[in-house]
Image (cartoon, helix red, strand yellow):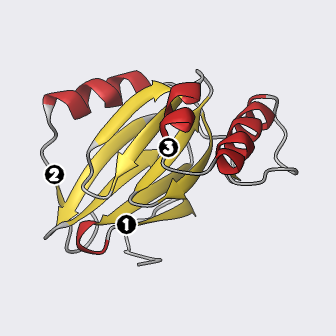
Amino acid sequence: MMQGWSQAATSRYQDHVIAHVLGATALGYFILADAAYVLLDIALIWTIYTSGEMALMPQAIVISDLDADEDVKRELLADAELLHQGETERLARMLAMPAEFLINDVKIFEQGKRRRVSLEAEETGFIFEGLPDMGEIKAVFSKGDYDDDRGF
């Protein structure tokens, strides 16, 4: 367990979303306002909010509903298509996952009001840390063991 962090209880809805993302491949992500958006190979976007709450919806719906100008939405849609095609060089808004990332496990941790959503793949991990009081979310990719609080 991460030092100073305890595993958080999950809601029924979080459990439902997590069950759907297990076995999917995360292709890329972007952060906008108080949420991280993870593009999955199944044409869905998994939204992770600073509070640890989450949603799972089709990528076109999520992007069209964003509070962003039309140029940003167009670039995000184009990036999603590029990532589905395996193209990572010409992305405008999204960041490609730094490695092949088949989601094997998801855990949520808490430390006061802070939340961490930990995605685990075969030999890599990815953490989204939400700071609800600041309306901020950060992302850190790690190879191997990342239980040492690095990056935050």
- Is 118 or 75 nearer to us in this picture? 75
Q: Amino acid at mark 3?
A: Leu
In the rendered image, residue 129, in percent from the top left (x then y), is placed at: 37, 63
In the rendered image, residue 1, in percent from the top left (x then y), is placed at: 26, 61
Q: Amino acid at mark 1?
A: Asp
| Residue 112 in the figure: left or right of residue 70 | left
In the rendered image, residue 91, in percent from the top left (x then y), is placed at: 79, 50
Could you give the CA–CA distance between mark 3 and mark 1, rounded to whole angstroms? Answer: 33 Å
Q: Amino acid at mark 2?
A: Ala
- Residue at disc 2, secondary structure: loop
Q: Tag on residue 8? A: 2
Could you give the CA–CA distance between mark 1 and mark 2, rounded to whole angstroms? Answer: 16 Å
Residue at (44, 61) in percent of width and height: 33
Q: Tag on residue 66? A: 3
Mark 1 or 2 closer to N-term? 2
Residue at (43, 46) in percent of width and height: 119
Mark 2 or 3 closer to N-term? 2
In the rendered image, residue 69, in percent from the top left (x then y), is placed at: 61, 51
Q: In front of the other: label 1 or label 2?
A: 2
Mark 3 or 1 closer to N-term? 3
Residue at (31, 58) in percent of width and height: 50
Instruction: Give the labeled residue for mark 1.
Output: 147
**Circle 2 crowding by C-alpha within 10 Å: few under 14, some 14–19, many from 20:** some
| Residue 85 in the figure: left or right of residue 37 | right
| Residue 74 in the figure: left or right of residue 106 | right
